[in-house]
Image (cartoon, rainbow, N blue to C red):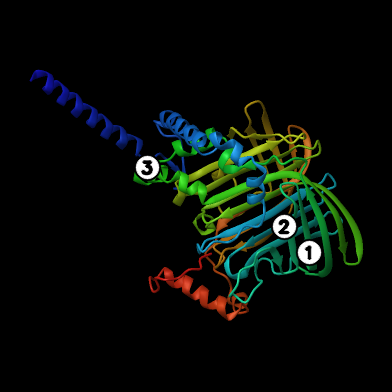
Amino acid sequence: MVFLLVLGLIFVIVVIFMIITLKVLGLKPPLIFDKYPLKGIFYRVKFWIALLILRRLRYRIYRRNELLLGSEHHLAKIDQPQELSNDPKSYDVVSFMAANKEGEKLMVTMERRRRGVLKAALYLWLPEKGLFSSPNLPDMIYFTTDGGEESREFQGGGFYVYQEESMKVWRIKYKGVLKSNGEVVKKVPVELNLRFKSSSAEYFDYNRDLSSSLIADSIAREAWNEKFYSLMQSVKYIVEKRTHYEQHGELTGKINFNGEALSLKMFGFRDHSFGTERCLSSINRYVYFALFMDDGSSMVVGNLSQPSFFLSSLKVGYVCTPSGNYLPLTGSNFELYSYGEKGIPPQHQNFVVRTEENEYLIQIQVKESAVRYVGLNWESKVFNQFVACTVNGVSGQGHAEFLYRFRGGRPDDISSKDPTWYQNITRFERSLTLLELEDVDFIF
């Protein structure tokens, strides 16, 4: 009898301890600007718990499936343009960023959405001529079908981007006009034909290769409430719904610029993202740097704030060595609240990042910038910066992106030119917030 009483008392104590522990772990840490959490009193305990869970999940999803995920069949499958599913949020994006020591820079991004909607942008920075961009910017939306069929290639609006060799070679073509950046806008005819080639099939997969320490740091700063535990239960589902990888290489080719033939040779990378979980309207902010050094190395550094996804400040990035090895960042002191929180990106940035073996002092100087808007109703505003940099004394060139929430909406003088079928869909989309319709299947 006494034994049973002791067992009952121990059980009660354990339950009370667990309840108190859960309450303590669920406490909200101090916030900067009511958005960005600092390290709470139990940060270190939460960090190690999160790190153990992450490593276990990654082993289950990736490490024990390395042969399958590294096979030629799988790589060919993920590298080709993806078939858009019936999910209304289905997307497929390919992007390129590149630069050289002469200061020439190129950025191309193309996002395929359902019913032939294409979101595209091109920036070309030539030091002696200035910055030029695709004519629709700051709006990115193009229509490649009549809304009743799907596109199956990255093509439209003068753009054509396609694969020549799986995980090795892609072709970038554009034929049309580009407009100058500045008070006086000039439009010049441009024909671009570039070839992106990677030296190997190696790539950096953000789900698989991003440092577990960086993710654990972000998770440990948050309050571990019901939302957190629900997220942990659905991690495998979330991973399956979004793929994002990057591959570094060399970009070469010709540009016919207003009748003048130019040759380009740059270091760069290709980004491929697809799935159904890429809603930019839920992102509070992000900052992203792509830097290409004169010694052949390159670097990506970023910080993403998406509180709706339980990550108020997630640091990301890696270093790519001249030989093509990808080294994930394990630490970074780049904090969103210190750089452009009021909506105006800084013209200079200095910060430090680390890999397991090295530390890098990064110094950024902005040379030129432009603005574009993304989303169905311009939910986000992106500042594209074209920068010079120094990393541990080595010079380089590159790109930066600062994304902010935007509430001004897509202007009527632009949206009124959209096809009728698309205007009808946008009305349906806006009515969702008023709960007027329940059966809408096209979300941006």
Q: Secondary structure at mark 2?
A: strand
Residue 135 in view here:
yes
Considering only vertical position in the picture, is 157 above or below 46? below
Q: Secondary structure at mark 1?
A: strand
Residue that carries the numbered disc 1 in the rendered image: 174
Residue 40 is drawn in which quadrant?
A: top left
Residue that carries the numbered disc 2 in the rendered image: 108
Q: Nearer the viewer, residue 258 or 155?
A: 155
Q: Nearer the viewer, residue 431 or 337?
A: 431
Could you tell me how far apart the alpha carbons at marks 2 and 3 are, in whole angstroms? 38 Å
Residue 333 in view here:
no
Residue 413 position within the rendered picture, expressed as x and y whole percent measured from the top left: 62, 77
Dot 3 surroundings within 10 Å: few (below 14), some, or many (20 or more)? few
Q: Amino acid at mark 1?
A: Tyr
Of the numbered discs 2 and 3, the one sitting upstream in the chain is: 2
Residue that carries the numbered disc 3 in the rendered image: 229
Could you tell me how far apart the alpha carbons at marks 3 and 1 are, in whole angstroms? 47 Å
Of the numbered discs 3 and 1, the one sitting upstream in the chain is: 1
Residue 236 position within the rendered picture, expressed as x and y whole percent measured from the top left: 47, 44
Q: Amino acid at mark 2?
A: Val
Q: Amino acid at mark 3?
A: Tyr
Evaluate if marks 2 and 1 touch, with contact meaning CB atoms under 8 Å apart.
Answer: yes
